[in-house]
Image (tube, rainbow, N blue to C red):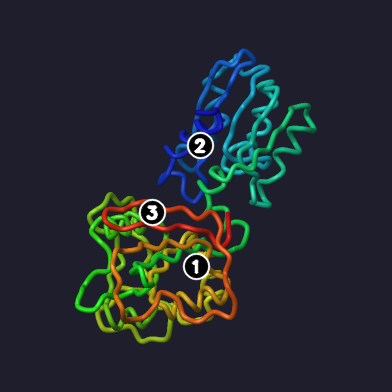
């Protein structure tokens, strides 16, 4: 494991407690190549990862190299600028996994160079992916949108005579996804057909996501979903202004196609079942031109295969 990979691993320890801030990890390595300090951002308002790692290193930080997953901040926020702490500690070099897309906090690399610290920016995809929702939120003013669908081998979203398309393992993972995002949404067609709850069940939950329905109302009596009836882009901007960084889209083909046509989907997650339905609606409607995906990966989830790919990388 490289030092940056270790910093990424440490950053994950703050998952769920740093919100709305990103998760960040840092490792301090002495000139002799020894790890002398580690740290991660624990919660909002607490010292940042670099400061925690520098405190652990003490005087051993002088002349050391610091590996950090996100560009050190150069502004006064809830805590002092991390770049000042790095300069004061006398570090020789800072290796940055990903640049800060937040215009308020960016500029840390330039500040360090101006004070004689060598800087290397690796632009690690893993470091960027770790904060993909936050990066999209601060740079675009909209949530990071994941479109999730359960499909058959012939691309259908229903199986005649069956309640579920995919297996139990995939359905559990969907609940884990719900527990990890800020909001979950469907279209009004799905609301009327299935009356979905959209909450996370049967998995550890720090906080339940907001549950949304896009489209024209009214909502059925007793529905606990929030109706969002405006233009999609405007609704997403309003949600972002309310602190929604990530949105899991679980709607049917009509809503998915509308989001795709407006360029509002960042990531696809398709749970593919070992079934050929032979009939029923497909996952996507008509598109005027092909959409290029990147970073395609696949893995088994029970009897199914999960395909993940990006339309817009973080």
Residue 184 % position (x, y): 39, 66
Residue 18 drawn at (x, y percent): 46, 44
User: At numbered mark 3, what does the secondary structure look like: helix, strand or loop?
Assistant: helix
Q: Earlier in the sequence, mark 2 or mark 1?
A: 2
Residue depth check, mark 2 versus mark 1: number of the one nearer the observer: 2
Which badge, 1 or 3, is on the more N-terminal residue?
3
- For mark 1, give the secondary structure: helix
Q: Residue at x 68, y 17 (%)?
A: 63
Query: Is mark 2 in CB contact (under 8 Å) with mark 1?
Result: no
How packed mark 2 is, by other alpha carbons closer than 10 Å (few <14, some 14-19, many 20 or more), is many
Residue 98, percent from left and from top: 62, 43
Q: Residues within 10 Å of mark 1 (few under 14, many from 20)?
A: many
> In the rendered structure, which disc, 2 or 3, sits on the residue that comes first in sequence?
2
Vertical order, 145 against 45 (above or below): below
Find residue 279 and name its label. Answer: none
Q: Is the residue marked by circle 3 packed among few (<14), some (14-19), or many (20+) residues within 10 Å?
A: many
At horizontal 35% and vertical 68% (from top left) the residue drawn is 153
User: Residue 31, relative to residue 272: is it above or below?
Assistant: above
Residue 296 at least partly seen: yes
| 2 or 3: mark nearer the eye | 2
Taking the image as shown, residue 53 lies to the left or right of residue 191, namely right
Residue annotated with mark 1? 239
Position of residue 208 in the picture relative to residue 73 (left or right): left
- Residue bearing mark 2: 8
Q: In whole angstroms, how far apart are the C-alphas of marks 1 and 3? A: 17 Å
What label does residue 180 carry, if any?
3
Local SS, label 2: helix
Whole-angstrom CA distance, mark 2 to mark 1, is: 28 Å
Q: Is residue 173 above or below residue 40?
A: below
């Amino acid at each position: 494991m490289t030092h940056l990979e270790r910093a990424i691993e440490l950053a994950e320890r703050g998952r769920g407690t740093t919100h709305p801030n990103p998760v960040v990890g840092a490792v301090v390595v002495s000139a002799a190549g020894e790890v002398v300090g580690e740290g991660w951002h624990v919660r909002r308002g607490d010292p940042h990862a670099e400061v925690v790692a520098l405190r652990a290193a003490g005087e051993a930080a002088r002349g050391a190299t610091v590996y950090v997953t996100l560009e050190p901040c150069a502004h006064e926020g809830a805590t002092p600028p991390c770049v000042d702490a790095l300069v004061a500690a006398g570090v020789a070099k800072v290796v940055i996994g990903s640049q800060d897309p937040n215009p308020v906090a960016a500029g840390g690399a330039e500040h360090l160079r101006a004070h004689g610290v060598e800087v290397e920016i690796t632009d690690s995809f893993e470091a960027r992916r770790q904060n993909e929702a936050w990066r999209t939120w601060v740079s675009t003013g909209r949530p990071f949108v994941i479109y999730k669908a359960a499909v058959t081998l012939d691309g259908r979203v229903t199986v005649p005579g069956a309640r579920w398309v995919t297996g139990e393992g995939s359905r559990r993972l969907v609940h884990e996804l719900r527990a990890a995002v800020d909001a979950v949404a469907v279209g009004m067609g799905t609301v009327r057909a299935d009356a979905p709850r959209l909450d996370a069940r049967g998995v550890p939950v720090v906080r339940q996501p907001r549950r949304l329905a896009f489209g024209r109302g009214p909502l059925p009596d007793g529905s606990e979903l929030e109706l969002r009836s405006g233009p999609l882009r405007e609704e997403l901007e309003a949600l972002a202004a309310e602190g929604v960084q990530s949105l899991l889209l679980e709607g049917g083909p009509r809503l998915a196609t509308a989001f795709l046509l407006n360029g509002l989907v960042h990531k696809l997650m398709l749970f593919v079942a070992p079934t050929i339905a032979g009939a029923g609606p497909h996952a996507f409607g008509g598109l005027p031109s092909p959409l290029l995906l990147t970073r395609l990966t696949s893995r088994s989830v029970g009897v199914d295969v999960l395909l993940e790919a990006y339309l817009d990388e973080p």
